[in-house]
Amino acid sequence: MMQLAYDLTDTVEIGGIDHDIDLSFDNVLRILDLISDKEINGEVMVTVSLELFFGVCFLIDVEKQAAILKQVLSDVVGVSDNEEENLDVEGNPMPKNSPDEGKVYDLKQDANYIYASFMQDYQIDLIEQQGKLHWHKFNALLAGLKDDTKFRNVIEIRQSELPSGKGSGKQREQMKKMKKLYKLKDES
């Protein structure tokens, strides 16, 4: 979690020893992508994820590695279980969904909208910031995007109710088209 009174940390204590950790936003996104890949063996995913975070291979059994990965994801990255793509810097859903709603954005599918929105709002080129911009800063900036950015517009369309009532047929059809255009691939 980011705290303004303290520096961002790039170390994690494991077994009483501090280890340097790569928390650049693109590295964390790669790890989250790896974790969500159903075709990758669980042991390989754990080992590779830890290597991406720490730059070294842990020579301990995979159960201990999995526990370390779970701890890092929860305590440092701010994600747990399969919620990593819906959370802000503090691990809270962003934007907040009701339990019966599906997710409203996907960091991978919405990459173009996120990139364009960072350029529009902050004049930050995320490609140039790879390896530099800290994960917590990225999340704070993502959560703070203005409503007039493409990313926020897409989220608003996905969350919008279809117009109802007399005389709303045209608006209803237009909104259906927009929802279909911006629908996430894994939505039913």
Image: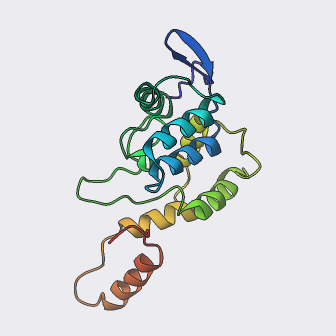
* x and y, in percent, of residue 3 in the image: 53, 24
Location of residue 49 in the rendering, given as x and y in whole percent from the top left corner: 55, 38
Hey, which residue is sitting farthest right in the picture?
128
Image x and y of residue 131, in percent: 72, 40
Q: Residue at coordinates 72% horizontally, 50% vertically from top-left?
A: 124
Frontmost residue, 116 versus 62: 62
Q: Quadrant of residue 25?
A: top right
Q: Quadrant of the C terminus?
A: bottom left
Q: Is residue 131 above or below residue 72?
A: below
Q: Quadrant of residue 156?
A: bottom left
Image height check: is 45 above or below 5? below
Q: Residue at x 37, y 85 (%)?
A: 171
Residue furthest top as drawn: 16
Query: Does residue 142 lie above or below 23 as drawn?
Result: below
**Residue at 48% in and 51% down:** 40
Instruction: Locate residue 5, reporting x and y percent.
Output: 57, 19
Q: Above or below — where is 76 with respect to 35?
A: above
Which image quarter: residue 119? Answer: bottom right
**Count of numbered badges drawn on the protein:** 0
| Pick the front one: 34 or 128 | 34
Q: How is the image coloured?
A: rainbow
147 displayed left or right of 157: right
Front residue of 163 and 166: 163
